Amino acid sequence: MDDIECIVIGAGVCGIAIARALACAGREVMVIEAESSIGTQISSRNSEVVHAGIYYPKGSLMARLCVSGRQKLYDFCADRGVAFARCGKLIVATNEAERPGLALIKERGEANGVEGLTLLTAHEARTLEPNLCCTGALLSPATGIIDSHAYMLALQGDAEHAGAVFVCNSPVMRASVLTEGIAVEVGEIDPITLRCRLLVNAAGLAAPALAARIEGMPRHLVPTAHYAKGNYFVLSGRSPFSRLIYPVPVPGGLGVHLTIDLGGQARFGPDVEWVSEIGYDVDASRAAGFYDAVRRYWPALEDGALQPGYCGIRPKLVPEGAAPQDFVVQDWRTHGVPGLINLFGIESPGLTAAIALGELVRDRAALNRAGHATP
């Protein structure tokens, strides 16, 4: 059995950021990924939006890590030459009944420390975006867009420069808690067993299933996975807007919003489709709902202008209709297993929060090592 100090399971953006934080703190780190390359699931199937931290309850992990992570992300990208743009976004009310909601969103965002939020009249919003139809809007200048893959590669480069090793095509089959660390069985064919002092479960959609395969992890503390699929449709031609356009949020997500990539291509989504299995086919018939949603704030959208794009899956910990979830970073103080940290329900704003989340896990791991006789 080979020994390594820290194993991070999952090479999505959060797993990479955690590996970077641990390696830069001088710890020996191996990242184990089941897929053939980094960031192939949640991290590459999203809107590539840098969120400001507006929507989340004050004091929640989502709020704290998004606000602190956003500035860390912008600073990192500026330093490493990763492409991004602080394009800003407008959250729009499309009828009078929605307008009071904008003030509530502004109040929540300011309570989280989001700067620059400004309520706009319909005229002021149309001055910024002449193609917009609304009764009022909330401007968030701190919101932006990013090249998510370049961002992950830059984080990986930092981690590897600090000594971290990435191993792909290596599914983790099971693990078990030993007196001397945690044993991790890797590989379906000719598996090997590694022993580590710190195991970070950052497996994204598979995190609950992986936790259930860790012998010694209390089963009643493993959450049930729920999947909320989000479909995207792309617009033919350039975007009619220079900023991101978001409706007032809907249960389960932020509504069918318009985002732009760094090349000016517009895409709409995601919607919310609760599913029982992971799959990445876009149902073209869902376009009808997109036209209805988008025309509330952009009536000029022409028939046939939307084409199926891609989809992603949100790793929910609560079922449809339940109250919104928070990020869960579960350590020994909850489950009683020294050296094990589980990350559950890391959906949006995980991309924005990744660096801050990595630092949080690094600090929790240091507390674990200092406060327990961890092997």
Image (cartoon, helix red, strand yellow):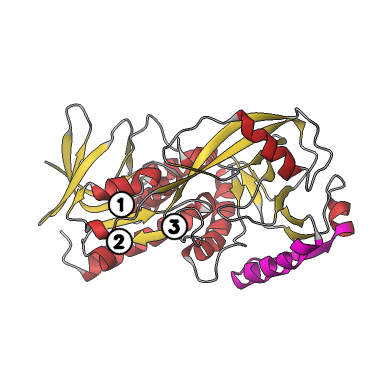
| Residue under numbered circle 1 | 200
Give the amino acid at mark 2: Ala
Secondary structure at numbered mark 1: strand
Is disc 1 surrounded by few (<14), some (14 to 19) or many (20+) residues within 10 Å?
many
Vertical arrangement, residue 136 with respect to residue 12, above or below = below
Callout 3–callout 2 Cβ contact below 8 Å: no
Are dots 2 and 1 in contact, CB under 8 Å? yes
Q: Which mark is residue 122?
A: none
- Splitting the image into 4 quarters, where does residue 121 fall? bottom right
Residue 110: x %, y % from top left:
65, 70
Q: Residues within 10 Å of mark 2 (few under 14, many from 20)?
A: many
Nearer-N-terminus badge (2/1): 1
Residue 163 location (% of width, % of height): 33, 44
The residue tagged with tag 3: helix, strand or loop?
helix
- What is the secondary structure assignment of the residue under circle 2? helix
Q: Is residue 355 left or right of residue 161?
A: right
Q: Is residue 374 left or right of residue 312?
A: left
Question: Vertical placement of 238 versus 198: above or below?
Answer: above
Q: In which quarter of the image is the N terminus?
A: top left
Q: Identify which residue is drawn at 40% across, 61% down.
A: 360
Q: What residue type is labelled 1?
A: Val
* Foreground of the two, 323 or 210: 323
- As shown in the figure, which amino acid type bears the numbered disc 3? Leu
Q: Where is residue 49 in the image (x, y as percent from the top left)?
A: 61, 47
Q: Earlier in the sequence, mark 3 or mark 2?
A: 3
- Residue 70 lies in what quarter of the image? bottom right
Q: Name the residue under label 3.
A: 357
Q: Tell me what residue is drawn at x 57 percent, y 31 percent.
A: 283
Please provide the residue range marked out in magenta: 96-122
- Disc 2 designates what residue? 365
Residue drawn at x 37%, y 29% as measured from the top left:
36
